[in-house]
Image (spheres, coloured by chain):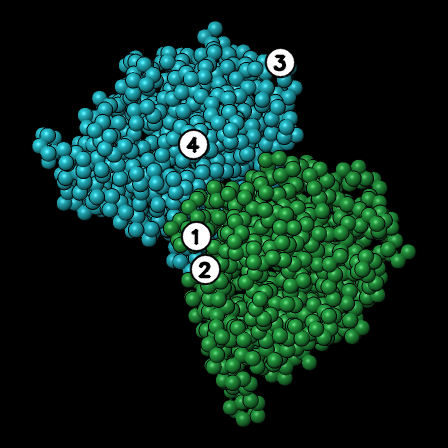
Chain colours: A cyan, B green
Amino acid sequence: MRYHPFALAVLVLGGTAMTATSDEGMWLLNDPPRDALQQKYGFQLTDEWLKRAMLASVRLNSGGSGGFVSAEGLLVTNHHVAADSVQKLSKPGTDMLANGFHAPTRDKELKCPDLEINVLQGIEDVTKEVNAAVKPEMAPGAAAIARRAVMAGIEKKSLDATGLRSDVVPLYNGGQYHLYRYKKFTDVRLVFAPESGIAAFGGDVDNFEYPRHGLDVAFFRAYENGEPVKTPHFFKWNAEGPKENDLVFVTGHPGVTQRLETLAKLKHRRDLTLPYTLARLRALEAALTQFSEQSPEKKRQAATDLHSAANARKAFSGQYQGLLDPAIIDQKKKLERGLLDSAYALRNMARMGEGIQPQGRLEGPDRIHDATEQVAAIQGRFAKFEKEWNLFETGHAFATPLFGMARHCVRMAEELPKKSAERLREYRDTNLDSLKFGLFSPAPLYPELERVKLQTSLTFLAEQLGAEHELVKLALAGKNPAQRAEQLIAGTKLLDPEVRKKFIAEPETVATSTDPLIVLARSIDAESRKLRTRYDSEVEEPERQAYSALAEQRFANFGNTQAPDATFTLRLAFGTVKGYEVGGEKLPFHTTFGSAFQRHTDQGGKEPFDLPKRWTEGKSKVDLATPFNFVSTADTIGGNSGSPVLNRAGELVGINFDRNRHGLVRNFVYTEVQARHIAVHCRAVLEALRRLYPAESLVNELTGK
Amino acid sequence: MRYHPFALAVLVLGGTAMTATSDEGMWLLNDPPRDALQQKYGFQLTDEWLKRAMLASVRLNSGGSGGFVSAEGLLVTNHHVAADSVQKLSKPGTDMLANGFHAPTRDKELKCPDLEINVLQGIEDVTKEVNAAVKPEMAPGAAAIARRAVMAGIEKKSLDATGLRSDVVPLYNGGQYHLYRYKKFTDVRLVFAPESGIAAFGGDVDNFEYPRHGLDVAFFRAYENGEPVKTPHFFKWNAEGPKENDLVFVTGHPGVTQRLETLAKLKHRRDLTLPYTLARLRALEAALTQFSEQSPEKKRQAATDLHSAANARKAFSGQYQGLLDPAIIDQKKKLERGLLDSAYALRNMARMGEGIQPQGRLEGPDRIHDATEQVAAIQGRFAKFEKEWNLFETGHAFATPLFGMARHCVRMAEELPKKSAERLREYRDTNLDSLKFGLFSPAPLYPELERVKLQTSLTFLAEQLGAEHELVKLALAGKNPAQRAEQLIAGTKLLDPEVRKKFIAEPETVATSTDPLIVLARSIDAESRKLRTRYDSEVEEPERQAYSALAEQRFANFGNTQAPDATFTLRLAFGTVKGYEVGGEKLPFHTTFGSAFQRHTDQGGKEPFDLPKRWTEGKSKVDLATPFNFVSTADTIGGNSGSPVLNRAGELVGINFDRNRHGLVRNFVYTEVQARHIAVHCRAVLEALRRLYPAESLVNELTGK
């Protein structure tokens, strides 16, 4: 059950834990918020409702969410989630990102070069098995290896038994481990995408803002054995959409939150990680903007890279302002204090002879103290090599997929002869198919664009570490970043997927290859692996142990009243559709087609407010009162892009695509004062498809005609 | 004479000093390169030629150069130099930067709100007097104060005696001190500016590139007592322009170079100063770009700020790549080694009894060793507080002119009661008029733009130092950067120049003012002054002493064969008009109107290649063979923008406006392999004025009709 017996007493004492009336929470499907929904909304969450939510929700491995909306494999997501595939399907002269795409018949649907989608089939708690493999007496390095091995073993066993993609996911920052089993599809075809001018109307200016006017949707179809897959579990497309104050649900795959992190970790992020990240993104965004200005074709080539960088920059800027806000830091301090206070309260109750025993190996308060200090100490150690680790092992210094490919070639030659459980985690048997699917992608790469990205990131490497740092000298090999990027990109053959396949098929050729990117990946691998080992043993594993202790104590104090931080796995959120006030002005819960045209006019029709011709010329054909975008209080974060928004009946009433800027602090704390997620209204999609595109067959499939 | 008797011997021995055939050098007008010109070009530099060059050249204190081109005060400079004034003369609905301006008659000429121009009248060497005030036994702090006092004294004496603006300028990084006397004009009126679409055709894409097509010119007229000033010394506008391989001269005010800096100083710049600078500029550029996208009016407001940031970012990026290039570092190493070798050679010659005595207080090689090591040690100390100094005292944390104004109000209240020689240098008597001219400028300021810049720079402050740094807490005063910037800009009255005047007239009101920017400037001033004192005594003064020793030794070894680094004072450069090769392609020495129209067409006419309507519609009216921009090997740098380019007869054949990217390393080393400066051709200006604008009265004044 959701409310722990002691939680209420603690709430009275501490006053800072989650209240029963908040819409906070990205809930696990195997531990759903039944009581809260019953209590606050009088809604009974049935097993049937949950089962459909699980089997009709989709994860797109390019980074987003979606949902099946017909029995024949049709799925909806955001245009900006689909953009990666739409971009890869485009070529010079055929800019489907800018101009849109529609397959009027199934044979015109376009197979995406490297899009994999996953549909969750079930979840199993394997915490005990994972933790049993890590003995208390193990040093962190050995513990990390043991944990990696047991996770790979569980996954392999599951894959062999079920044939399903099987991932062990750490939850509560390592407090629990669950095994997620997915049905996976790699034949996914593009059905419909609108023009980016209406999908991302308002561009960077309106991104993370509201009122908003984006037709940020796209449709794919999943295929199996060359046929559309049968999807009996799908979300019915609602014809009306939500009214103000309606309860709605969001089922999707929120990527990352840091709500359960300690204050020390958040301060580390604030003072080290985020400034580094912002500097990195600004450098990349500036370079891509400048590249784009050089010609319309270059603008086309860089479009998705530029949007990703700008979107991330804006999101992280909001997070950074949040962590610099003393009010937010105070709130986190109070939460941290509240956990401790509640542990003291429980101990006192126990000592007063009320028969309650605190859980855990140590007494609660001591344990919390220890774990909190441990996390703080880990940050001090991490600060010493975080930049190096990010630049080399995360690959920030080599910001081209070509480097990632070169590294896979080099590492697979070394890793695959090992037993699966002993390999670097991404090369475990259960992940190899997905990895190769990406590695062998025939998606086009543009040498000049990759050269600019690589030059920018190599320059960033030098900026961050200084020219005389050993890693910088190793990476630059006696050249400046401009010369080095030129040499690497001009010389590599890795743009050809056949060359990549050959390196994997003939791993013995890797060691003697003179391809400059292979040589680079080879030459830095020893240093890079050292950094990874150091991260695994000095940061990740000790953090998991500390957070595990905190999580146990949190369960002991509050029960399961707090959802785990986001992990790009399926979650259920809920909230109320409602507008909000900014500076005394009441913003409506939804915008309309009419207000979109108004904004276009107010801005002189200039980019990024230049509506596609189809829209300006078709204005008279649409009902201007059609609701366009709407907002609700449900708890979402990046990764939720494309998530189905559902009503009580489990029907699709919208497609989530953004938060407003007030919601950017939700990485750290949930708030519903002004903070909202933003969704495309189900009626906007139908009206646009019917009147403007027109895409009658798609409308018929959605409406079941 | 230019060649020291020992220099040739040294050249043979060391082989690394400047060769007689290079066009390197931004030469002092009181130590001009007569011999080099005679030897290489057979050109006799006469006193008359030099006098005109001096009296017809103009410094614009907004940061650039120009030259008189008629006897009635008409002066030409770059559009991008004039942009600051053009922007300040514009208002919502009247965008003269974008749309251009032309005063057909004198009464329509527009007085610039805060443009001061200076015309050099004479130079006096005051090295002995300055150095005499600094006693060897003085600690650096006392030495810095003594040096500042003697400089202020010399300036005051000169002002009183001549009525001319008098500035003591350190040359050779402190090796010499010269007194520069200027006639100054503060009534400067805008006569003509083209549309920015043709002035900066190609925008950021073509900036620092060649082939180039910019009509980067503007005309002002200097007034005195309400009448155009008589300027008998002016540059005659040549009707033909240069041919390939012609000798040309550039007379202008190059801003900053670092060619005589030691390797340790350059490495400090490479590993600390430049990465910091690039991060700062990128943050500002990104914020201004995003602000500009919000509406056409916001784009207008931010135009010059954005151009400045983008231009600086591109220049510094080129410098950074240069310092990361091992070949450049090797070249600098060899030069440093060459100075030492030549000193050893001279000592050996002396010891061999050839009667030559090394100069200087110590023996040459030891002295060079000592000074070089001193500079290196200074960098180590500087690194400990450089960011703090830049953020607080240079004001990078508060990137709005409103903060600079607030600080002037606060500091003048404290400084003006002191004796002139004891004040912070900018408040010396001889500078007060110019300072107040800027401070009381009626130029418009836009609160929302200033808020965005301030938020960006306060955020940058936190990024650089971390949220818990004392200076960050002091500046943010319990808010996050967004909230703090909002509070400061919403509350200040300093946008009104009358308010600024009142604070200066009634300095006693400063201490009790509740204007939030005044309160900010007051609250940080103690810390900021500490950083300034630390910089003066730990960096500037010891560097001056060390460089003075190096300069003396350089004179002893090489004579006056090297020009001092640039100091935004008048210099004479010379070079050959010639094209160059890139990747096997020969680039012509000039472009044409025809190639500009071609580039417009090739780029689909899209921004930044959108020629003004006047040009696209007037294409048939112009001679497409008209030379547009041309290049030469003459030695220029930022600050040279707007410099007259002259022929042997001292006639104006072009207006310098840029370098190409190969020339960006010229901050550190001169090269003429590919490196070129770029100028607007004299014929392009006449043809455009005659056929397109038309501006017949201006043409008549230029051609003396």
Report helix, strand or loop for mark 3.
helix
Quadrant where the N terminus of chain B sits is bottom right
Q: For the residue carrying disc 4, how many other residues have a C-alpha within 10 Å: few (<14), some (14-19), or many (20+)?
A: many
Report helix, strand or loop for mark 4.
helix
Q: Amino acid at mark 2?
A: Glu
Residue A445 visible, this angle: no
Q: Position of residue A185 (x, y in %)?
A: 37, 23
Q: Position of residue B368 (x, y in %)?
A: 49, 78
Image point (21%, 29%), residue name: A9
Q: Give the labeled residue for mark 2.
A: B527
Q: Please tell me the numbered disc located at residue A663.
A: 4
Q: Give the labeled residue for mark 3.
A: A621
Closest to the camera, between mark 1 and mark 4, is 1
Q: Give the labeled residue for mark 1.
A: B474
The reply to the same-chain question for discs 1 and 4 is no
Chain on which label 1 sits: B
How far apart are the two marked residues, 1 and 3, measured between alpha carbons?
58 Å
